[in-house]
Image (spheres, rainbow, N blue to C red):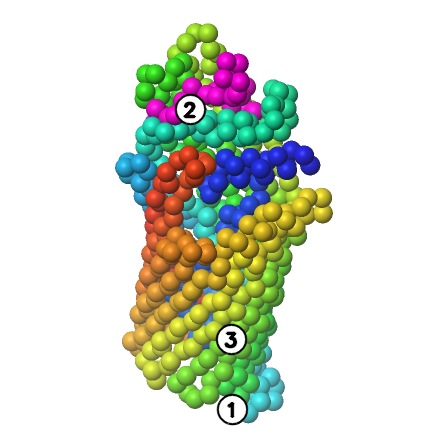
Amino acid sequence: MKTINKLVVAVVLITGLTDVSFSQNSVDALRYSRIFYQGTSRFQGMGGAFGAVGADFSALAINPAGIGLYKSTEFTITPEVWIGHSVSDYNGVKSTDDIGNFALGNVGFVFSIKPPNAQKKGGFQNFNFGFGINRQNDFNTRTFISGPNNTSSLMTGYTNVLNNQPWMSSDDINYDYPFDIAPAYNANLIYYNDSLGKYTCDAMNGGVYQQNEVTTYGSINEFDMSFGASFEDKLYFGATFGIPWIRYYERSTYSEIRTDPSVYPFQSLLYNQYLETTGTGINLKVGVIYRPIPWFRVGVAVHTPTYYGNMKDTWNSDIASSFTDSTQWNSVQYSPIGDFHYQMATPFRAIGSMAFLIGNAGVFSAEYEFVDYNQARFYSSDESFQDVNDEIRNKYTIPLNLRFGTEWRIQNFRIRGGFGYYGSPYKGGGTQGERYTASGGIGYRGKYFFFDAGYTWAKMSEDYYLYDPALVNPSHNIQYSHAISTTFGVRF
């Protein structure tokens, strides 16, 4: 696995904190560990603060005890339209981009069974079973970054990697760096300068205009199987066995165009990178909700780490070069197709929640989610992830994750609102990676049919480096999203 080892080194030296790479790293661990629950329109409209509210299928992914509050059999389905908008600021140039997606927030069944000896007071009131799919994460984004660079080029980082180790022949470069440096070398973008005694490039000190469009799409969906019960209509408990699956796709198109005439004979380059990640995992969630008095409920839930036993990455790249000097050949070079199998475990979670019921008029709810992102881990039978796992330990921390929601009843109609705050997952990260959500919705509840509509706005900002942070300024990126969902449900 010499190629994989060299690739890890290359990613660390070249891409630094960038999100685009062809090796398992701390960015991947955070991406699959950080969950922004979606689901039914009622759930989203109340900001996802359902740990002590219950009686909603999406609540089974937060606190399975919520299934104990069902008193009838129910089916729900939630189509959703998602729109993303990004803003970047790189070296004084602002750029924007947009992307859209259609998906299912949830589809689920809950079967409620009343015990034959159930009484109005005392004992078990009902046993409930549920199964279906909840959407946990949406990876659809597109970010466009552009701006001048008068200090470095992507190729500067490549030459630094080659010059910071013993001299390498072209065969060594092709063997050790087949996905990035080798294609650039074979496209004549970097070369060995005999007079200098080292590798160099035409735009060593910049003088180029840089652009990068990164498109990601995919999701984490989870198949949930739940069981729960109500005891004396005061104590509710439940468990959910979850089978999440990851589908993540990333395409990066990076280009440089000469702006300084002294950068010669280089004219332009175009570098495409492609990554696909898939995997299926398992987890267990257990929870309780207790109602000590009629107007107050408190809930607690714990989620085991999710273990993904069959993660697979597939990646490749290509690079095209263009020169103004006829002695230099324009070229397009392709990498091989790489693939790698490994395992991953996401962190343990604990969620505490409370709900205040205002008679039959409405409810206020709040919850806190505990998750330590530095507990995510990669594993492989034939590859050591010690360095990557150490980076995860040193880079991430326990953020402050809070969700709030409210719902008010006007006869058969409902009005909802919610707010969420997800703190920075980085140690000493300040506002890096902070996420805010605001939501609202309406609904209609009939005896056998109900309908809900919800809207969720989200904002997250984070710095992005095109390559080695020692060579390039960050692009200050802000990601906005707008989710519009409708839930259709029937009761039996």
Q: Residue at x 32, y 64 (%)?
A: 440
Q: Residue at x 57, y 64 (%)?
A: 348
Q: What SS does tag 2 mark?
A: loop
- Residue 135 appears in view: no
Ranked by sequence position, the earlier of labels 3 and 1 is 1
Q: Residue lying at the far right in this picture: please name it.
A: 381
Mark-to-mark CA distance, 1 and 2:
80 Å
**Marking on residue 300:** 3
- Between 148 and 381, the one lying in front of the other is 148
Quadrant placement of the N terminus: top right
Mark-to-mark CA distance, 3 and 1:
26 Å
- Between 221 and 480, the one lying in front of the other is 480
Residue 243: image quadrant is bottom right
| Marks 1,2: beta carbons within 8 A | no
In the shown orientation, is residue 361 left or right of residue 396? Answer: left
Q: Which residue matches tag 2?
A: 204
Which kind of residue does numbered mark 3 sit on?
Answer: Val
Q: Residue lying at the far top in this picture: please name it.
A: 326
Q: Is residue 242 above or below residue 252?
A: below
x and y percent of residue 402 in the render? 40, 67
Closer mark to the observer between disc 1 and disc 2 = 2
Range covered by the magenta-colored residues: 180-209
Q: Residue at x 40, y 42 (%)?
A: 464
x and y percent of residue 434 in the render? 38, 56
- Residue 4 appears in view: yes
Which kind of residue does numbered mark 2 sit on?
Answer: Met
In the shown orientation, is residue 117 left or right of residue 160? Answer: right
Q: Which residue matches tag 1?
A: 120
Mark 2 Cα-neighbour bin, 10 Å: few <14, some 14–19, many ≥20: some
